[in-house]
Image: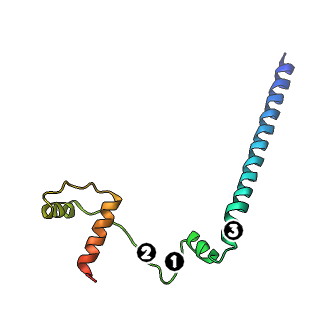
């Protein structure tokens, strides 16, 4: 009886290993197809240095970093004082962007 159980467990382990190897080979095939069909056209194009530089988080000399900040509660309060008829806006990324551009316009109008 014990020998039969061991044989059955070995058989199940072998089946599980075969399935796992098939899954790994399928994953590698999909990865190769993705690289061949999607990434290679970018890597061999004229814009390849641009794509590779941005993959490595490097900026070109003409590019600048823009940092958006969430305005403080006092800034929201003064903004609401200015626009009393408007509803209070939520602090969302679009609102933070508008606030950034508004602050930028106040410091440098041109």
> Residue at left 30%, top 69%?
100
**Residue at mark 2:** 65
User: Which numbered disc, 3 or 2, marks the residue that appears first in the sequence?
Assistant: 3
Residue 12 percent across, percent down from the top left: 79, 29
**Circles 2 and 1 in contact, beta carbons < 8 Å:** yes
Element under disc 2: loop
Q: Earlier in the sequence, mark 3 or mark 1?
A: 3
Residue at mark 3: 41
Q: Position of residue 39 (x, y in %)?
A: 67, 64
Q: Position of residue 72 (x, y in %)?
A: 24, 62
Label ID, residue 46? none
Residues at marks 3 and 2, CA–CA distance in whole angstroms? 28 Å
Q: State the residue at coordinates (34%, 61%).
A: 94
Q: Nearer the viewer, mark 3 or mark 1?
A: 3
Q: CA distance from mark 3 to mark 1?
A: 22 Å
- Check whether the beta carbons of the residues at disc 3 and disc 2 lie within 8 A of each other: no
Residue on which the image places disc 1: 59
- In this rendering, position of residue 101 left or right of residue 52: left
């Amino acid at each position: 009886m014990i020998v039969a159980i061991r044989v059955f467990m070995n058989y199940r382990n072998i089946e599980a290993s075969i399935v796992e190897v098939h899954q790994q080979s399928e994953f590698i095939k999909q990865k190769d197809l993705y690289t061949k069909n999607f990434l290679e056209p970018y890597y061999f194009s004229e814009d390849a240095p641009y794509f590779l530089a941005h993959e490595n988080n490097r900026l070109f000399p003409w590019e600048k970093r823009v940092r958006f900040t969430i305005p403080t509660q006092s800034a929201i309060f003064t903004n609401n004082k200015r626009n009393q008829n408007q509803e209070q806006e939520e602090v969302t990324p679009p609102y933070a962007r508008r606030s950034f551009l508004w602050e930028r316009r106040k410091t440098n109008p041109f």
